Image: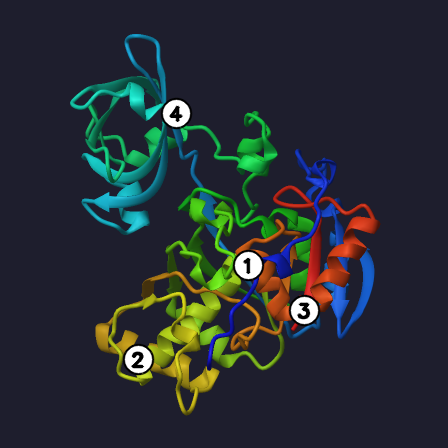
Amino acid sequence: MEIPKIDLSEYEYTLPDERIAKFPLEKRDASKLLHYREGEISHFYFYDIPELLPADTLLVYNDTKVIPARLIFQRETGARIEIFLLQPIAPTTVIPEIMLAKHPVTWETMIGNAKKWKDGEILKGRVAIKDQEVVLSAKLISREEKQVEFSWDNPDIAFVDLVEASGEVPLPPYLNRKPNEEDKSRYQTVYSKKEGAVAAPTAGLHFTAEVFEKLRAKGTQEAEVTLHVSAGTFQPIKAQNVLEHPMHSEQIQLTKETIQKLLAQKGKTVAVGTTSVRTLESLFWYGVKLIEGKGEDFFIHKLFPYEKRENVPSKVEALQAILIQMEKNQAETVLGNTEIFIFPGYSYRMIEGLITNFHQPGSTLILLIATILGEDWRKVYREALEKDYRFLSYGDSSLLWV
Protein backbone atom coordinates (compact mmCIF):
# COMPACT_ATOMS: atom_id res chain seq x y z
CA MET A 1 0.00 0.00 0.00
CA GLU A 2 1.04 3.59 -0.49
CA ILE A 3 1.59 5.07 2.94
CA PRO A 4 -0.14 8.42 3.38
CA LYS A 5 1.30 11.26 5.40
CA ILE A 6 -0.31 11.23 8.84
CA ASP A 7 -0.48 14.55 10.64
CA LEU A 8 0.15 14.37 14.39
CA SER A 9 -2.35 17.16 15.08
CA GLU A 10 -5.19 14.87 13.96
CA TYR A 11 -4.53 12.57 16.93
CA GLU A 12 -4.28 15.14 19.70
CA TYR A 13 -6.91 15.84 22.33
CA THR A 14 -6.94 17.81 25.59
CA LEU A 15 -6.28 15.65 28.65
CA PRO A 16 -6.58 17.64 31.90
CA ASP A 17 -4.01 16.62 34.50
CA GLU A 18 -6.75 15.87 37.04
CA ARG A 19 -8.08 13.13 34.73
CA ILE A 20 -4.81 11.17 34.92
CA ALA A 21 -5.18 8.45 37.56
CA LYS A 22 -2.21 8.96 39.87
CA PHE A 23 -3.01 5.93 42.07
CA PRO A 24 -4.83 2.62 41.52
CA LEU A 25 -8.34 2.00 42.79
CA GLU A 26 -8.72 -0.08 45.93
CA LYS A 27 -10.14 -2.99 43.88
CA ARG A 28 -8.66 -3.85 40.49
CA ASP A 29 -11.91 -4.92 38.85
CA ALA A 30 -13.92 -1.93 40.17
CA SER A 31 -12.64 0.25 37.34
CA LYS A 32 -15.12 1.55 34.77
CA LEU A 33 -15.38 -0.23 31.43
CA LEU A 34 -16.43 1.53 28.23
CA HIS A 35 -17.87 -0.88 25.66
CA TYR A 36 -17.70 0.05 21.96
CA ARG A 37 -19.27 -1.96 19.16
CA GLU A 38 -20.23 -0.72 15.67
CA GLY A 39 -20.47 2.90 16.71
CA GLU A 40 -22.49 2.24 19.88
CA ILE A 41 -21.03 3.08 23.31
CA SER A 42 -22.25 1.66 26.62
CA HIS A 43 -20.85 1.74 30.15
CA PHE A 44 -20.07 -1.03 32.62
CA TYR A 45 -17.57 -1.97 35.31
CA PHE A 46 -14.65 -4.28 34.62
CA TYR A 47 -16.17 -7.09 36.70
CA ASP A 48 -18.93 -7.18 34.04
CA ILE A 49 -16.55 -8.21 31.28
CA PRO A 50 -17.39 -11.95 31.40
CA GLU A 51 -20.95 -11.04 30.27
CA LEU A 52 -19.63 -8.93 27.38
CA LEU A 53 -17.40 -11.60 25.80
CA PRO A 54 -18.85 -14.47 23.73
CA ALA A 55 -18.33 -17.90 25.31
CA ASP A 56 -15.96 -19.02 22.55
CA THR A 57 -13.65 -16.01 22.93
CA LEU A 58 -9.89 -16.57 23.06
CA LEU A 59 -8.36 -14.00 25.42
CA VAL A 60 -4.68 -13.33 24.71
CA TYR A 61 -2.74 -11.64 27.48
CA ASN A 62 0.86 -10.59 28.03
CA ASP A 63 2.52 -12.41 30.92
CA THR A 64 5.57 -10.15 31.16
CA LYS A 65 6.61 -9.04 34.65
CA VAL A 66 7.78 -5.53 35.45
CA ILE A 67 11.26 -5.39 36.95
CA PRO A 68 12.25 -2.58 39.33
CA ALA A 69 14.45 -1.23 36.53
CA ARG A 70 15.50 1.99 38.26
CA LEU A 71 18.77 1.34 40.09
CA ILE A 72 20.14 4.03 42.42
CA PHE A 73 23.84 4.39 43.25
CA GLN A 74 25.62 6.97 45.32
CA ARG A 75 29.10 8.31 44.67
CA GLU A 76 31.44 8.76 47.60
CA THR A 77 30.83 12.50 47.25
CA GLY A 78 27.13 11.84 47.90
CA ALA A 79 25.95 12.53 44.34
CA ARG A 80 23.04 10.28 43.35
CA ILE A 81 23.34 8.42 40.03
CA GLU A 82 20.19 6.81 38.67
CA ILE A 83 20.57 3.98 36.13
CA PHE A 84 17.47 2.90 34.23
CA LEU A 85 17.73 -0.49 32.48
CA LEU A 86 16.60 -0.40 28.85
CA GLN A 87 17.95 -3.25 26.71
CA PRO A 88 20.42 -6.07 27.46
CA ILE A 89 23.66 -6.05 25.45
CA ALA A 90 25.91 -8.84 26.78
CA PRO A 91 26.51 -11.71 27.30
CA THR A 92 23.10 -12.09 25.59
CA THR A 93 20.36 -9.83 24.28
CA VAL A 94 17.69 -12.36 25.33
CA ILE A 95 15.96 -10.84 28.36
CA PRO A 96 14.94 -14.08 30.19
CA GLU A 97 18.52 -15.37 29.89
CA ILE A 98 20.28 -12.21 31.06
CA MET A 99 17.96 -11.89 34.06
CA LEU A 100 19.17 -15.31 35.28
CA ALA A 101 22.87 -14.56 34.67
CA LYS A 102 25.22 -15.04 37.63
CA HIS A 103 28.17 -13.21 36.10
CA PRO A 104 28.74 -9.66 34.77
CA VAL A 105 26.07 -8.27 32.44
CA THR A 106 25.98 -5.20 30.21
CA TRP A 107 22.86 -3.11 29.54
CA GLU A 108 21.93 -0.13 27.45
CA THR A 109 20.57 2.38 29.97
CA MET A 110 19.34 5.87 30.66
CA ILE A 111 21.53 7.60 33.24
CA GLY A 112 20.34 10.35 35.53
CA ASN A 113 23.05 12.78 36.66
CA ALA A 114 25.51 11.20 34.18
CA LYS A 115 27.79 14.26 34.21
CA LYS A 116 28.71 13.50 37.82
CA TRP A 117 29.82 9.94 36.93
CA LYS A 118 33.49 10.07 35.98
CA ASP A 119 34.98 7.80 33.30
CA GLY A 120 36.59 4.75 34.90
CA GLU A 121 34.78 5.30 38.20
CA ILE A 122 33.08 2.18 39.59
CA LEU A 123 29.91 2.79 41.58
CA LYS A 124 29.12 0.35 44.38
CA GLY A 125 25.97 -0.44 46.31
CA ARG A 126 25.19 -2.94 49.05
CA VAL A 127 22.16 -5.18 48.54
CA ALA A 128 20.60 -7.45 51.18
CA ILE A 129 19.49 -10.78 49.66
CA LYS A 130 18.60 -13.98 51.49
CA ASP A 131 20.17 -12.89 54.78
CA GLN A 132 23.44 -11.93 53.14
CA GLU A 133 24.95 -8.73 51.79
CA VAL A 134 25.98 -8.54 48.16
CA VAL A 135 28.07 -5.74 46.67
CA LEU A 136 26.70 -4.63 43.29
CA SER A 137 29.10 -2.64 41.10
CA ALA A 138 28.35 -0.50 38.05
CA LYS A 139 30.94 0.53 35.47
CA LEU A 140 30.29 2.95 32.61
CA ILE A 141 31.80 1.25 29.57
CA SER A 142 30.39 3.57 26.89
CA ARG A 143 29.21 7.06 27.78
CA GLU A 144 28.09 7.76 24.22
CA GLU A 145 25.97 4.60 23.98
CA LYS A 146 25.08 4.68 27.70
CA GLN A 147 26.25 1.10 28.21
CA VAL A 148 26.82 0.00 31.81
CA GLU A 149 28.38 -3.24 33.04
CA PHE A 150 27.06 -4.66 36.31
CA SER A 151 29.02 -7.14 38.40
CA TRP A 152 28.60 -8.54 41.92
CA ASP A 153 30.62 -10.48 44.46
CA ASN A 154 28.43 -13.56 44.92
CA PRO A 155 28.27 -16.11 42.04
CA ASP A 156 25.22 -17.80 43.58
CA ILE A 157 23.05 -14.72 43.07
CA ALA A 158 21.26 -14.06 39.76
CA PHE A 159 20.99 -10.57 38.30
CA VAL A 160 17.20 -10.65 38.65
CA ASP A 161 17.57 -11.14 42.43
CA LEU A 162 19.74 -8.02 42.68
CA VAL A 163 17.30 -5.97 40.65
CA GLU A 164 14.27 -7.20 42.62
CA ALA A 165 16.01 -6.45 45.94
CA SER A 166 17.44 -3.03 45.14
CA GLY A 167 15.55 -1.44 42.25
CA GLU A 168 12.65 1.00 42.23
CA VAL A 169 9.39 0.39 40.35
CA PRO A 170 9.65 2.38 37.09
CA LEU A 171 6.36 4.28 37.21
CA PRO A 172 5.40 6.18 34.03
CA PRO A 173 6.78 9.75 33.98
CA TYR A 174 3.29 11.27 33.65
CA LEU A 175 2.35 10.05 37.15
CA ASN A 176 4.89 12.58 38.39
CA ARG A 177 5.42 10.90 41.76
CA LYS A 178 7.75 8.52 43.55
CA PRO A 179 6.73 4.85 43.73
CA ASN A 180 5.37 3.60 47.04
CA GLU A 181 5.07 0.14 48.60
CA GLU A 182 1.65 -0.49 47.04
CA ASP A 183 3.05 0.04 43.52
CA LYS A 184 5.23 -3.07 43.86
CA SER A 185 2.15 -5.26 43.58
CA ARG A 186 -0.37 -2.98 41.87
CA TYR A 187 1.86 -1.94 38.94
CA GLN A 188 1.90 -5.63 38.02
CA THR A 189 -0.76 -7.91 36.57
CA VAL A 190 -1.96 -10.83 38.71
CA TYR A 191 -0.71 -13.22 36.00
CA SER A 192 2.75 -11.68 35.48
CA LYS A 193 5.59 -14.20 35.56
CA LYS A 194 8.38 -13.50 33.04
CA GLU A 195 10.68 -10.74 34.29
CA GLY A 196 11.87 -8.18 31.81
CA ALA A 197 9.41 -5.29 31.28
CA VAL A 198 10.15 -1.73 32.37
CA ALA A 199 6.48 -0.76 32.03
CA ALA A 200 3.36 -2.73 32.88
CA PRO A 201 0.95 -4.03 30.23
CA THR A 202 -1.66 -1.89 31.93
CA ALA A 203 -4.82 -3.30 30.30
CA GLY A 204 -4.21 -6.41 32.39
CA LEU A 205 -4.12 -4.54 35.71
CA HIS A 206 -7.93 -4.82 36.00
CA PHE A 207 -8.06 -8.62 36.01
CA THR A 208 -8.63 -10.48 39.29
CA ALA A 209 -8.91 -14.12 40.28
CA GLU A 210 -12.70 -13.64 40.51
CA VAL A 211 -12.92 -12.27 36.95
CA PHE A 212 -10.86 -15.19 35.64
CA GLU A 213 -13.08 -17.63 37.53
CA LYS A 214 -16.21 -16.22 35.85
CA LEU A 215 -14.55 -16.21 32.43
CA ARG A 216 -13.44 -19.83 32.75
CA ALA A 217 -16.88 -20.92 34.00
CA LYS A 218 -18.34 -19.39 30.85
CA GLY A 219 -15.92 -21.33 28.64
CA THR A 220 -13.62 -18.50 27.59
CA GLN A 221 -10.20 -19.75 26.44
CA GLU A 222 -6.86 -18.13 27.32
CA ALA A 223 -3.46 -17.89 25.65
CA GLU A 224 -0.26 -16.27 26.87
CA VAL A 225 2.23 -14.23 24.91
CA THR A 226 5.25 -12.35 26.19
CA LEU A 227 6.27 -8.85 25.15
CA HIS A 228 8.76 -7.14 27.42
CA VAL A 229 7.49 -3.55 27.35
CA SER A 230 10.29 -1.04 26.84
CA ALA A 231 10.58 2.57 27.97
CA GLY A 232 9.99 3.59 24.36
CA THR A 233 6.28 3.03 24.93
CA PHE A 234 6.25 6.44 26.70
CA GLN A 235 8.28 8.20 24.01
CA PRO A 236 6.15 11.05 22.63
CA ILE A 237 5.81 11.53 18.88
CA LYS A 238 7.74 14.67 17.98
CA ALA A 239 7.56 14.47 14.18
CA GLN A 240 4.63 16.31 12.61
CA ASN A 241 4.41 13.48 10.08
CA VAL A 242 4.06 10.58 12.52
CA LEU A 243 5.58 8.09 10.06
CA GLU A 244 8.95 9.70 10.75
CA HIS A 245 8.70 8.68 14.42
CA PRO A 246 11.47 6.17 15.32
CA MET A 247 9.65 3.14 16.74
CA HIS A 248 11.28 1.34 19.67
CA SER A 249 12.07 -2.35 19.38
CA GLU A 250 10.59 -4.78 21.91
CA GLN A 251 11.38 -8.43 22.54
CA ILE A 252 8.60 -10.99 22.19
CA GLN A 253 8.27 -14.70 22.85
CA LEU A 254 5.50 -17.20 22.06
CA THR A 255 5.13 -20.91 22.66
CA LYS A 256 4.07 -23.51 20.12
CA GLU A 257 1.01 -24.14 22.30
CA THR A 258 -0.13 -20.52 21.94
CA ILE A 259 0.39 -20.55 18.17
CA GLN A 260 -1.63 -23.79 17.91
CA LYS A 261 -4.45 -22.21 19.96
CA LEU A 262 -4.50 -19.20 17.64
CA LEU A 263 -4.58 -21.48 14.62
CA ALA A 264 -7.46 -23.57 16.01
CA GLN A 265 -9.53 -20.59 17.18
CA LYS A 266 -12.93 -20.33 15.47
CA GLY A 267 -14.52 -17.63 17.66
CA LYS A 268 -13.37 -14.12 18.51
CA THR A 269 -9.76 -13.44 19.46
CA VAL A 270 -9.52 -10.57 21.94
CA ALA A 271 -6.17 -9.06 22.88
CA VAL A 272 -5.64 -7.84 26.42
CA GLY A 273 -3.74 -4.63 25.82
CA THR A 274 -1.84 -2.96 23.01
CA THR A 275 1.26 -5.02 23.84
CA SER A 276 -0.65 -8.23 23.05
CA VAL A 277 -1.89 -6.66 19.81
CA ARG A 278 1.66 -5.76 18.75
CA THR A 279 2.80 -9.29 19.58
CA LEU A 280 0.01 -11.03 17.66
CA GLU A 281 0.21 -8.80 14.61
CA SER A 282 4.02 -9.15 14.56
CA LEU A 283 3.60 -12.92 14.71
CA PHE A 284 1.40 -12.77 11.61
CA TRP A 285 3.95 -10.72 9.69
CA TYR A 286 6.74 -13.09 10.73
CA GLY A 287 4.74 -15.85 9.04
CA VAL A 288 4.39 -13.64 5.94
CA LYS A 289 8.14 -13.01 6.00
CA LEU A 290 8.78 -16.77 5.99
CA ILE A 291 6.29 -17.36 3.16
CA GLU A 292 7.85 -14.56 1.09
CA GLY A 293 11.35 -15.95 1.66
CA LYS A 294 12.59 -12.73 3.26
CA GLY A 295 14.72 -14.41 5.92
CA GLU A 296 14.14 -16.59 8.94
CA ASP A 297 15.02 -14.01 11.58
CA PHE A 298 12.02 -12.83 13.58
CA PHE A 299 12.39 -9.07 13.34
CA ILE A 300 9.50 -6.93 12.15
CA HIS A 301 10.54 -3.50 10.88
CA LYS A 302 8.08 -0.72 11.69
CA LEU A 303 6.81 -0.42 8.10
CA PHE A 304 7.16 -4.05 6.93
CA PRO A 305 3.34 -4.59 6.95
CA TYR A 306 2.92 -1.68 4.52
CA GLU A 307 5.25 -2.98 1.81
CA LYS A 308 3.60 -3.49 -1.57
CA ARG A 309 2.62 -7.11 -2.19
CA GLU A 310 0.18 -8.68 -4.65
CA ASN A 311 -1.34 -11.05 -2.13
CA VAL A 312 -1.28 -11.11 1.65
CA PRO A 313 -1.31 -14.66 3.09
CA SER A 314 -4.17 -15.63 5.38
CA LYS A 315 -3.83 -15.91 9.14
CA VAL A 316 -3.90 -19.72 8.80
CA GLU A 317 -1.15 -19.73 6.17
CA ALA A 318 1.05 -17.40 8.23
CA LEU A 319 0.69 -19.43 11.44
CA GLN A 320 1.25 -22.72 9.62
CA ALA A 321 4.46 -21.34 8.10
CA ILE A 322 5.72 -20.49 11.59
CA LEU A 323 4.87 -23.95 12.94
CA ILE A 324 6.72 -25.57 10.01
CA GLN A 325 9.74 -23.37 10.77
CA MET A 326 9.58 -24.35 14.47
CA GLU A 327 9.40 -28.05 13.55
CA LYS A 328 12.43 -27.59 11.32
CA ASN A 329 14.34 -25.95 14.19
CA GLN A 330 12.91 -28.41 16.78
CA ALA A 331 11.80 -25.36 18.78
CA GLU A 332 9.02 -25.15 21.35
CA THR A 333 9.17 -21.35 21.50
CA VAL A 334 9.73 -18.56 19.00
CA LEU A 335 11.72 -15.49 20.05
CA GLY A 336 11.74 -12.25 18.11
CA ASN A 337 11.86 -8.49 18.12
CA THR A 338 9.34 -6.05 16.76
CA GLU A 339 9.05 -2.35 16.12
CA ILE A 340 5.70 -2.72 14.33
CA PHE A 341 3.90 0.60 13.87
CA ILE A 342 0.11 0.31 13.69
CA PHE A 343 -1.64 3.39 12.34
CA PRO A 344 -4.82 4.16 10.32
CA GLY A 345 -4.70 2.28 7.04
CA TYR A 346 -3.51 -0.91 8.73
CA SER A 347 -5.77 -4.01 8.61
CA TYR A 348 -5.81 -6.19 11.72
CA ARG A 349 -5.05 -9.81 10.85
CA MET A 350 -5.17 -11.55 14.24
CA ILE A 351 -7.74 -9.90 16.48
CA GLU A 352 -11.44 -9.06 16.57
CA GLY A 353 -11.39 -7.15 19.85
CA LEU A 354 -9.16 -5.26 22.26
CA ILE A 355 -9.26 -4.58 26.00
CA THR A 356 -7.28 -1.43 26.68
CA ASN A 357 -6.95 1.66 28.89
CA PHE A 358 -7.19 5.27 27.69
CA HIS A 359 -3.97 6.60 26.17
CA GLN A 360 -1.98 9.81 25.92
CA PRO A 361 -2.80 12.40 23.25
CA GLY A 362 -0.60 12.26 20.16
CA SER A 363 0.89 8.88 21.05
CA THR A 364 1.59 5.77 18.98
CA LEU A 365 -1.09 4.04 21.06
CA ILE A 366 -3.76 6.56 20.07
CA LEU A 367 -2.89 5.77 16.45
CA LEU A 368 -3.35 2.06 17.21
CA ILE A 369 -6.77 2.79 18.76
CA ALA A 370 -7.77 4.96 15.80
CA THR A 371 -6.93 2.01 13.55
CA ILE A 372 -9.73 0.09 15.30
CA LEU A 373 -12.25 2.90 15.79
CA GLY A 374 -11.62 5.13 12.78
CA GLU A 375 -12.92 8.66 13.36
CA ASP A 376 -14.98 7.29 16.26
CA TRP A 377 -11.86 7.39 18.45
CA ARG A 378 -12.67 11.04 19.16
CA LYS A 379 -16.25 10.15 20.09
CA VAL A 380 -15.04 7.42 22.46
CA TYR A 381 -12.47 9.65 24.17
CA ARG A 382 -14.90 12.58 24.42
CA GLU A 383 -17.46 10.27 26.03
CA ALA A 384 -14.88 8.91 28.47
CA LEU A 385 -13.89 12.44 29.51
CA GLU A 386 -17.52 13.50 29.92
CA LYS A 387 -18.31 10.40 32.01
CA ASP A 388 -15.38 10.99 34.39
CA TYR A 389 -13.29 8.02 33.31
CA ARG A 390 -9.79 7.84 34.77
CA PHE A 391 -7.00 7.91 32.17
CA LEU A 392 -3.63 6.23 31.50
CA SER A 393 -1.82 3.43 33.34
CA TYR A 394 -3.82 3.32 36.58
CA GLY A 395 -7.00 4.47 34.85
CA ASP A 396 -10.19 2.82 33.62
CA SER A 397 -10.67 0.31 30.82
CA SER A 398 -12.46 -0.22 27.52
CA LEU A 399 -13.54 -3.14 25.35
CA LEU A 400 -13.34 -2.22 21.67
CA TRP A 401 -14.49 -4.41 18.77
CA VAL A 402 -12.71 -4.20 15.43
Q: Position of residue 144 (x, y in %)?
A: 24, 37
Residue found at the very far left of the displayed protein: 120
Q: Secondary structure at mark 4?
A: helix
Give me the disc on residue 166.
4
Query: Which is nearer the N-term, disc 1 or disc 2?
Result: 1
CA distance separating discs 2 and 4: 42 Å
In the displayed structure image, the side of residue 116 where residue 47 appears, left or right: right
Answer yes or no: do the residues labelled 3 and 4 have beta carbons within 8 Å? Answer: no
Residue at position x 83%, y 50% in the image: 386
Q: Is residue 117 above or below residue 26?
A: above
Q: Position of residue 372 (x, y in %)?
A: 63, 70
Residue found at the very far bottom of the displayed protein: 310
Are there few (<14), some (14-19), or many (20+) residues within 10 Å of tag 2?
some
What's the colour scheme? rainbow
At label 3, the amino acid type is Leu
Query: Which is nearer the N-term, disc 3 or disc 4?
Result: 4
Q: Position of residue 401 (x, y in %)?
A: 68, 70
Query: Which is nearer the N-term, disc 2 or disc 4?
Result: 4
Residue at position x 30%, y 8% in the image: 77
At label 2, the amino acid type is Leu
Q: Does residue 214 show up?
A: no
Residue tagged by mark 3? Answer: 373
At label 4, the amino acid type is Ser
Q: Does residue 324 show up?
A: yes
Residue tagged by mark 1? Answer: 274
Query: Which is nearer the N-term, disc 4 or disc 1?
Result: 4
Residue tagged by mark 2? Answer: 290
CA distance separating discs 2 and 3: 30 Å
CA distance separating discs 3 and 4: 42 Å
Answer yes or no: do the residues labelled 4 and 1 have beta carbons within 8 Å? Answer: no
At label 1, the amino acid type is Thr
Q: Position of residue 58 (x, y in %)?
A: 59, 70
